[in-house]
Image (cartoon, rainbow, N blue to C red):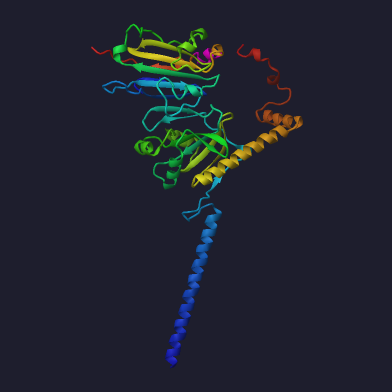
Amino acid sequence: MDGLSITVPPAWEARISRTTSDTDDGRTWPVAHIATIPLPSQRGDYGSNVVERLGSDDIFVSLVEFGAEAVDTELFPRVNDLPDTIGPDEFHPRQLQRVLPGQAGKQLFFTYQNRAFCLYVVFGSFARRSSLAQSLSGLLNRVSIAPRELQP
Amino acid sequence: MTAAYSLIIGLAVIVAFLGLLVVSLLRTQAEILRRLDGLGIRLDEDESSAPLTLSSRSAARTSTSEISGVNPAGDPVVKSLQIGHSPVLVAFLSTTCTSCLEFWQAFDSDSLVFHNATYRVLVVTLGPTEESPTRASKLSIGAVDVVMSSQAWSDFEVPGAPYFAVVDPSTRQVIGEGSAADMHALSTFLGDAAGDRRWDQSKMRDRTDADRERIVDAELRSAGLHPDDPRLYHDPRDRGR
């Protein structure tokens, strides 16, 4: 969808939909959700109605695109490749959009293929972040993002 | 007078013949209904029972690991059948069959409880080229999960809607499948499936070590592994060397 695709690994679920519009022009952007638990049909862009269901061995990933005005801004630095691993020590409860006991999160903002994204990952257990980071490793290599033409 | 008697007798014979004909037709119709009933086909609208079978547990088949398609809004979806703790009730529904309507109205959540057991509910229609996404969107209510996937219908060899399959996510085994005319029949079916699952589990616990050894030996033989096969004694650390 909109140049965003995922090769879903075994025992993961995925959905690609569009962001909930909160702009005046009503524009929406692709958002991909990937999780080790069944994804409910109704979810927030950053995992509300999902993260509450995570067990201690579970992972939720959200890849949210932002508009062209965010491309190459300070918050969204350009990267040449998607990160294939995120170290366990980069996860922290303070990075959670919604703090739930025991969980940990990580947010990354970047511009890739002339498109601005926020990658948000939630671990079901901060204590198990080492093994969960291993499970997450390689997942982002399965995400494919087609380039967007820059507006003149 | 003779002519009048002849006429009366003639009419009586005709009435008797017609009576026999009616009785014969009624008996034929009753026989047809009895045979249809034997095949599990009920013609009366109010009848709730329907042919719904539990899988032979010794020959239960393995389901696909996932169902992929789009939701009625057209968004890509991959639903795994090997995650979560609850059995997955995969409901193959159509937007046009009248008997499906009751299920569309009953499935208003992504999980439902039958006989004190929670089931994850996944409604699967044919793909958007064979089924109307607009009608599927209108019929799906609440938070029910709907995937449009003709491939899933093919994988599960669905003969027609409504059709149901219950998948155990821990083994991916289809522990029951069949059609049901209404929620009552589906509930009964799920109760039987849950009971059989408990029965299987209790029987597994009751097995002796000798029973388990026989089962393991049989499974190894069927996989081509016989006594003294060197593969039985390899060092797992040698993998990839």
Viewer-nearest residue: B85 or A84: B85
Q: Is residue A123 visible?
A: yes
- Where is residue B186 drawn, in percent x and y? 52, 43
Residue B148, by quadrant, is: top left
Left or right position of B71 against B210: left
Magenta highlight on residue A13: no
The overriding secondary structure of the stretch rendered in magenta is helix
Q: Is residue A130 above or below residue A51?
A: above
View extreme (left): residue: A152
Question: On the rendered image, what quadrant is the N terminus of chain B found in?
Answer: bottom left
Viewer-nearest residue: B8 or A58: A58
Viewer-nearest residue: B225 or A19: A19
Q: Residue at x 48, y 81 (%)?
A: B13
Q: Which residues are magenta?
A: A131-137
Q: Residue at x 35, y 20 (%)?
A: A3
Q: Residue at x 56, y 55 (%)?
A: B38
State how many labels appear: 0
View extreme (bottom): residue: B1
